[in-house]
Amino acid sequence: MLQRRTVPWLCALLLGIMGLPASGSDFQHHRYEDMVRVLFAVQSECPYITRIYSIGRSVEGRHLYVLEFSDNPGIHEALEPEFKYVGNMHGNEVLGRELLIKLSQFLCEEYRAGNQRITRLIHDTRIHILPSMNPDGYEVAARQGPELNGYLVGRGNARDIDLNRNFPDLNALMYYYEKTNGRNHHLPLPDNWEHQVEPETLAVIKWMQNYNFILSANLHGGAVVANYPFDRSRDPRIRGRTTYAATPDDKIFRQLARTYSYAHSWMHKGWNCGDFFNEGITNGASWYSLSKGMQDFNYLYTNCFEITLELSCDKFPPESALPREWLGNREALISYLEQVHHGIKGMVYDENNNPISKAEISVAGINHDVTTGVDGDYFRLLLPGTYTMKASAPGYLSSSNTVTVGPAEAIQLNFYLKKAPKQNLKGKHHHGKKNISANKASLKLGPR
Ligand SMILES: [Zn+2]
């Protein structure tokens, strides 16, 4: 560890090949107060590249603190993607929480040491880390400790609600729209949704509304596998049967999951905790169907692609297991983060170079659009290949372009949209038809 200050360039090399030695002493479980102390300590160690903010409070009033890393903390820079990691959604699944605390310390230390890979990542990405989405559940689990922890104690929040079954169910609406050519992204929330979710869930949904997240992972425990959407099978009536529920972005999700599993020291081997998952990845629904989960919600309600990482057989591993877990996951956590820089990104402008927000970007052959953020920037994760892209916005003529994506950094493709001629504005432009059919469909199905 000491050497890195004298030979910082070596760190970039070491990270990913053999890694820095893990000193055993900093590996411990963190109760709420301890976790908050560490996050603020990281913030004061790296004040110019970090910020701490709270997205709300738990049932028992604990702040849900996020640590942000960026070269301009607190500011979205156009074309710089937003990424998030969420840990400890199930209070008794604690490894993700500890890994994210460790990751925070690591990013700060390596940045200070001049590690080029980490410096570049922080300069090009806005990284948000929520180590614990369920601090109340954690305290219940931690009171029992690693040895005595039961399978379910502390899983839910203080009202014993499972937060990963607590998000608005948008899958049914999506599966209906698929058949009717309805909306394929940013589905509407049910009326009164705020009153139907727990405070922790509400805080996370508001968080998603306030930041244009592009990529995310949600860290769990109880198995070792990278799980990708959809979690909910298309036909919930088939009980006990496992049916693969592919998203239109199935190939990308499989690749994202593989990125984690292969960069992880043992996940990709497949045999873990008495289960076998080929390549260490699985489609959620083909494992078991789950409704109202956070992962599917990200994809159906926002621009964010999220996968669920199951990281340890033991949900509450002993402290002695933490150094090995950190070394097993460290490269995977960084590699996965770097995936946010693949595909195509760019700006959508009007004829006067004003950015257009909420413009829709569609990819021919993939029935899932993404939208531009408030600065008019968009990010479309894609595998290498040639794609026909289209940008459209109400009141403008849509514009198309064909681009080839390579394996390296995201390709930049900007769009300049011309105002639609006046006669086309009366519900006739490309956008109107889609909206009408979406409205009809929602009337038929109801909000929930
Ligand atoms: Zn879990």
Image (tube, rainbow, N blue to C red):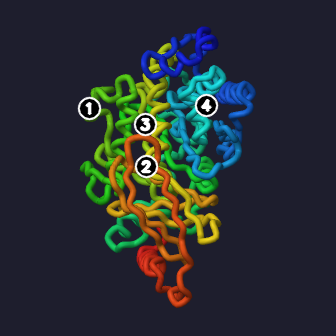
Q: Are marks 1 and 3 in contact (CB under 8 Å)?
A: no
| Camera-side residue of 124 and 439 | 124
Q: Is residue 41 above or below residue 152?
A: above
Between discs 1 and 4, the one toward the N terminus: 4
Q: Secondary structure at mark 1?
A: strand
Amino acid type of the residue tagged 2 in the rendering:
Gly
Instruction: Specify few, some or many for label 4: CA neighbours under 10 Å numbering under 14, 14-19, or 20 or more.
Output: some
Instruction: Specify few, some or many for label 1: CA neighbours under 10 Å numbering under 14, 14-19, or 20 or more.
Output: some
Question: What is the number of callouts on the image?
Answer: 4
Which residue is under mark 3?
A: 309
Q: Are marks 1 and 4 in contact (CB under 8 Å)?
A: no
Q: Nearer the viewer, mark 2 or mark 3?
A: 2
Between discs 2 and 3, the one toward the N terminus: 3
Q: Secondary structure at mark 4?
A: helix
Image point 50% across, 76% down: which residue? 397
Which residue is under mark 4?
A: 139
Q: Is residue 186 left or right of residue 181?
A: right
Q: Are marks 1 and 2 in contact (CB under 8 Å)?
A: no
Q: Are marks 4 and 2 in contact (CB under 8 Å)?
A: no
Image point 46% across, 70% down: which residue? 399
Which residue is under mark 2?
A: 343
Amino acid type of the residue tagged 1 in the rendering:
Phe
Amino acid type of the residue tagged 4 in the rendering:
Glu
Instruction: Specify few, some or many for label 3: CA neighbours under 10 Å numbering under 14, 14-19, or 20 or more.
Output: many
Quadrant of the displayed image that contains ligand 1 = top left
Between discs 1 and 3, the one toward the N terminus: 1
The percent coordinates of residue 48 (x first, y second) are 73, 33
